[in-house]
Amino acid sequence: MAGGEILTMDSIVRIVSIFIIYSFIVVTCFYLFSTPMELVFTGFEDADFGDAEDEKDSLMPTYRATFTLFFALFISLPVTWFVMKIFSREPSFYQVRRY
């Protein structure tokens, strides 16, 4: 970085393109992983756990909800970043310390 340049993403086109690409990747991953994970959860629900059947029945809905919330978090992160980046104010001058 010559001359004290600061690397910023000040282009609205770049911000929107990063947001769209990241959102597409996260939604695609959710649809790709949701069916195999649903099969895994169903396999655990159909398994015979013997004496631990009550614990399994109480924990499986939590695991399903956790999986869904995991991807909901990864959708909300770029939305939050996008809103914060669009509405952020960057000063046109930088303060310099003088001694």
Image (cartoon, rainbow, N blue to C red):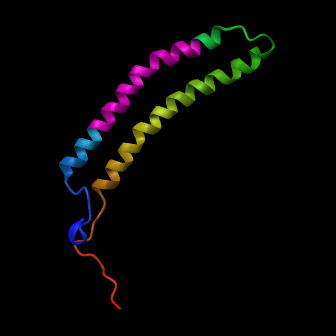
Quarter of the figure with residue 87: bottom left
Name the residue located 62 percent from the left edge and 23 percent from the top edge.
61
**Mark count:** 0
Where residue 74 sits in the image (x, y, percent)? 43, 38
Task: Check the picture and name the quadrant holding the N terminus.
Answer: bottom left
Front residue of 96 and 49: 96
Front residue of 84 and 47: 47
Q: Main secondary structure of the magenta part?
A: helix
Q: Is 10 situated above or below 74?
A: below
Q: Is 99 situated above or below 47?
A: below
Quarter of the figure with residue 29: top left
Name the residue located 69 percent from the left edge and 18 percent from the top edge.
57
Name the residue located 27 percent from the left edge and 38 percent from the top edge.
20
Where residue 11 sits in the image (x, y, percent)? 19, 54
In this view, which residue lies farthest toward the bottom?
99
Front residue of 95 and 1: 1
Quarter of the figure with residue 26: top left
Name the residue located 20 percent from the left edge and 51 percent from the top edge.
12
Q: Is 38 situated above or below 13?
A: above
Task: Check the picture and name the quadrant holding the C terminus.
Answer: bottom left
Q: Is 84 situated above or below 50?
A: below
Where residue 49 sits in the image (x, y, percent)? 74, 12
Q: Along the horizontal axis of the image, is 24 left or right of 75?
A: left
In this view, which residue lies farthest toward the right?
51
Where residue 34 sits in the image (x, y, percent)? 46, 20
Q: Say whether residue 19 is magenta.
A: no
- Which portion, as a residue range, is magenta? 21-42
Q: Along the horizontal axis of the image, is 30 left or right of 20?
A: right
Q: Say whether residue 25 is magenta.
A: yes
